[in-house]
Image (cartoon, rainbow, N blue to C red):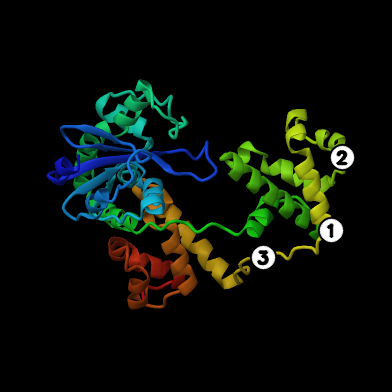
Amino acid sequence: MIHEIKGQKMVAVDTESNSLFAYREQVCLLQFSTPEQDYLVDPLAIADLSPLGEIFASTKIEKIFHAAEYDIICLKRDFGFEFTNLFDTMVAGRILGKGEIGLASMLEAEFGVHLNKRFQRANWGRRPLDAGMREYAQFDTHFLIPLRNCVYDELANSDRLDLAKEDFIRLCDTSVPQPESDLMNCFKMVGKNDLSPQQMTVLYELYLYRERRAETADLPTFKVLSNQALVDIAHTLPTNTRQLEELDGISPKVAARHADGLLNAVQQGLSRPPVSRPPFPRRPDDEYLERMDKMKDWRKQKGIELGVPSDVILPRDILYNIVGANPQNSDSLRDIMSTVPWRFSHFGSEILQTLHGREG
């Protein structure tokens, strides 16, 4: 397969992971398609996938994905791959202003192909994969090269190809998100629930208990106990199994399985000093908020004008960098928009006009 792909100008790529079935998600299948052949690669059976790194990093082979960001994050996280020369058919669809940008919708619109999505939420870590799952995986890349060719022509004919290439380059630099601390996750879990500092300490102990149980069972945490169940326990501070069972989301079966651990976590939280709230970002000043409102309004209107989502006009990270830096002239704005030169050349003057009532 490696030898075959190295002789190609483009290859379609997809991955399947097991996030709904494991404590630590991992890539469980990789799919590749050339114009002549489809391949399924089992990373659970192959110890060394490093030969794929040369393909992903090659400037000579275009890698075609649909909704590449998640796949890239997973492949970087699990295997350390680096990427160049990407084409994302979903990103292309958004830039073209297509209303339906799911792979199934785009394939049906372009080719009349109907994809069976019954295995979309399947356990891809299970072995062996049955024939239906293999076929499903195969067809996720089988039509990507013809789809790429169709939307490529549309991008070129609408003078948006350079804008798309700009986003494809940015996709290559997608970074693996760093996990939040356990304590930060607890505070984010609370939302609008009003918990005292001591109750937050209980919630933290409950959170840690769930993490231990999920890791031991190799299950996603939501399959052990829901966030809301933990918050409800921290709020009511039950002292016995009967009180646990009275809570919504705690069935008798769940209570029987976790009662000892949950009640012990409650007592641990009550006996420890209250946890301190992690520092949250400070509220921006009024001038910053005013600039943000003006820029968001401009971005929305520009999106309507061009028939695209507002973040196609200006990606969120670039928007926040511009609003935060408040550039006063074209040179300063160019530096901030160095990774989006097409957008700078087409929208730079309007951005400065929006910020300062002048073009800079």
Question: The disc labelled 2 sits on which kind of residue?
Answer: Asn
The residue carrying mark 3 is 278
Front-lying residue, 340 or 139: 139
Q: Would residue 197 be found to the left or right of residue 317 on screen? A: right
Between label 3 and label 1, give the one nearer the viewer: 1
Question: The disc labelled 3 sits on which kind of residue?
Answer: Pro
The residue carrying mark 2 is 240
- Do labels 3 and 1 touch, CB within 8 Å? no
The residue carrying mark 1 is 271
Quarter of the image for the C terminus: give it: bottom left
Q: Is residue 196 visible?
A: no
Decide which of tag 3 and tag 2 comes sooner along the chain.
Answer: 2
Front-lying residue, 53 or 291: 53
Quarter of the image for the N terminus: give it: top left
Looking at the picture, how far across and down is residue 54, in whole percent?
22, 53
Write down the quadrant of residue 261 in the picture. Answer: top right
Q: How many marks?
A: 3
What is the C-alpha distance between the residues marked 3 and 1?
21 Å
What is the C-alpha distance between the residues marked 2 and 1?
17 Å
Task: Tell me the number on the disc at residue 100.
Answer: none
User: Which element type, helix, strand or loop, lies under badge 2?
Assistant: loop
Q: Residues within 10 Å of mark 1 (few under 14, many from 20)?
A: few
Q: Would residue 139 be found to the left or right of residue 292 on screen? A: left
Looking at the picture, how far across and down is residue 350, in whole percent?
37, 65
Q: Residues within 10 Å of mark 3 (few under 14, many from 20)?
A: few
Residue 124, above or below 197: above
Between label 3 and label 2, give the one nearer the viewer: 2
Looking at the picture, how far across and down is residue 181, in whole percent?
60, 59
Question: The disc labelled 1 sits on which kind of residue?
Answer: Ser
Q: Would residue 143 be found to the left or right of residue 288 on screen? A: left
Looking at the picture, how far across and down is residue 142, in whole percent?
25, 31
